Structures are given as structure tokens and as C-alpha cells.
Image (cartoon, helix red, strand yellow):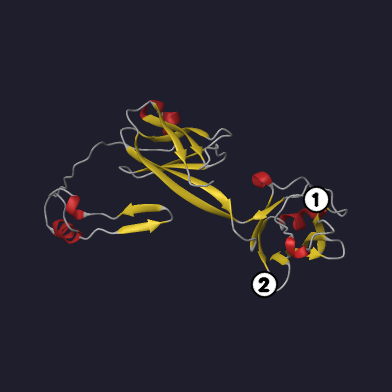
Amino acid sequence: KTKKRIKKGMDEVREFDPEKVTGSWITPEQFMKILAKEGEKSLAAPVKKLGYWNVDMAYSSPNKAVLLQGTVVDANKKAMQDVQIWAVGKDYYGQSPDKTGADGRFSALMVQFDSTVDVQVQYQTPAETDKKMDVFYVGGKLPEHEASLGKALRNVPGRYIKSDSEMKWTKGSASIEWDEKRRRWNHSVTDRVLFCLPCDEATEASETTPAAEGWRATSQVNLPAPCYRRSQLVTTETFGPFSTGPPGNFVDIGELSVRRA
């Protein structure tokens, strides 16, 4: 019957505490004994409200949903764009998503009425080193290309891991490595160089990184280059609890300021 606290990321979750439950609470063993008895059986429990909760509630029954609104800013009060928002029920089981716009606003975070929720803000920050590097096309869609390039191009996106012994990142048959003769980074698939990142002649190779802007296609292909960046760390910060109020309303929960500068 002791209480415990579990830490998961930046969130804290309370375990079930039977001491705070009314006298109608019974143990699993007692419940099984009741089920084993002959005759009719019944179970009573206090319930605040009955109903259901579907993700299409705002469309099928808009008068039964509540939409939370607010703004996400960083530690310097700058609006944060494309941040993932989650509403997590505290007195009901379920969660719903939304995303911030260019002004840091979210306006369609659908929640259950007459309830209490926490709001989670998830954002990404670059890793401290380039040991892991992500290569991707914005939107996740490959550019239009010749059929002969299809197999090689499909191997380009993904996470690349740096070698411990040389200036080289690899992912299966694809690799990113330093070309001292041309003073550039080369991105190859099965030894075919598709993209390159030219570097300044006066800069030492050890002072450069392929996780940078400026990549372009080589003379072998006519394609836009993907994006190259350090792997991203996902941070979750929790705000609340917030009361949702009666159904059919918009509720502004104000400004949510995260710790990221």
C-alpha cells in the first residue's frame, strides 16, 4: 500500500494508491472469490460521468468536445513552430494531438469536456556531437528521378553512424566520407558519388562536418540534395493540470514556456 513515484523522461506518474479509494475498494483476490460464488453478482463503483471518446468527436459531435488553444514559446519568449502537442487525460484514459504554427499557436487540441488534462510539449534539439547523423528529404518524399537512380536514391535517407577510426559515416551500402584530393565531403551509394559538400581550402578537414548546409548533386546526377544534420534529441515538457470545462467551448490555456533557449 505504499506510494511510489515513477520518472519517465520529464514526467512523473503516480501509482495507484488504495488508501485514497473509498470503502468500496476490494483486492483482486476478494473480487475472484465473489466471482466464484453461485447466483447473481453485482459490482458498484462511483462514476463521475459516463460516455465515450473517439478521435473524430470534434467532427461527429462538435457540441460534445472542447478545443484547447495556446502558444508555445522558448526561454527567450520566441514562438516555437512545428512543435508536437499532446493533451493527456488525467481523469479519463486517452490523448489527442495538435501542432503549433509559425506563430507558435495551437488551436485544435481536442479534449473531453468537464475533465482535467495535462498538456505535453515535445520539441527537438540537436545532439551535442555528430556521432549520429540524419539524412532526409523534407516531407519524407524522394525527388523525381530517373528509373536507373531509384535503388541508389532509396538508400540515401536514414541515420548514419560515424566510424571510430576514420572520417566516415555509414548506413548499409551508403557512406559519407572525406575526399582530401577534392577538399569535399562525398555521399556515395555502392561507390557511386551522388552528392558532395565542398569545403574551404584553408579549413582543416577535422574542423569541418558533413552535418551542414551547402550539399549539392555531383555531375553524375541531376537531383536536389537532401538535408544533413546531427541526430535530434526529443524533449518532453509537461504543463498542467488544466480544466476543460463544459462541452462545445474553446478554452485558451495561455502561454507555455519551455526551458529551451
Helix, strand or loop for disc 1: strand
Label 2: few (<14), some (14–19) or many (≥20) C-alpha neighbours in 10 Å: few
Count of labels in the image: 2
Q: Is residue 56 visible?
A: no
Q: Nearer the viewer, mark 2 or mark 1?
A: 2
Residue with the mark numbered 1: 216
**Residue 152 image label:** none
Q: Could you tell me which residue is drawn at 73 percent across and 50 percent down? A: 213
Where residue 44 appears, x then y in whole percent? 16, 45
Name the residue at the bottom extreme: 165
Q: Is residue 248 above or below residue 33?
A: above
Q: Is 54 situated left or right of 102 in this image?
A: left
Separation of residues labelled 2 and 1 (CA atoms): 26 Å
Quarter of the image where the N terminus is located:
bottom left
Q: Could you tell me which residue is drawn at 72 percent across and 53 percent down? A: 212
Q: Is residue 200 visible?
A: yes
Q: Quadrant of residue 130?
A: bottom right
Disc 2 to disc 1: CB gap under 8 Å:
no
Q: Is 4 situated left or right of 183 in this image?
A: left
Q: Could you tell me which residue is drawn at 52 percent across and 47 percent down? A: 260
Q: Quadrant of residue 5?
A: bottom left
**Residue 164 image label:** 2
Q: Identity of the amino acid at label 1?
A: Arg
Q: Identity of the amino acid at label 2?
A: Asp
Q: Is residue 219 above or below residue 181?
A: above
Q: Quadrant of residue 155?
A: bottom right
* First of labels 2, 1 by sequence position: 2
Label 1: few (<14), some (14–19) or many (≥20) C-alpha neighbours in 10 Å: some
Q: Could you tell me which residue is drawn at 54 percent across and 35 percent down? A: 104
Q: Is 88 situated left or right of 207 in this image?
A: left
Q: Is 35 situated left or right of 81 in this image?
A: left
Helix, strand or loop for disc 2: loop
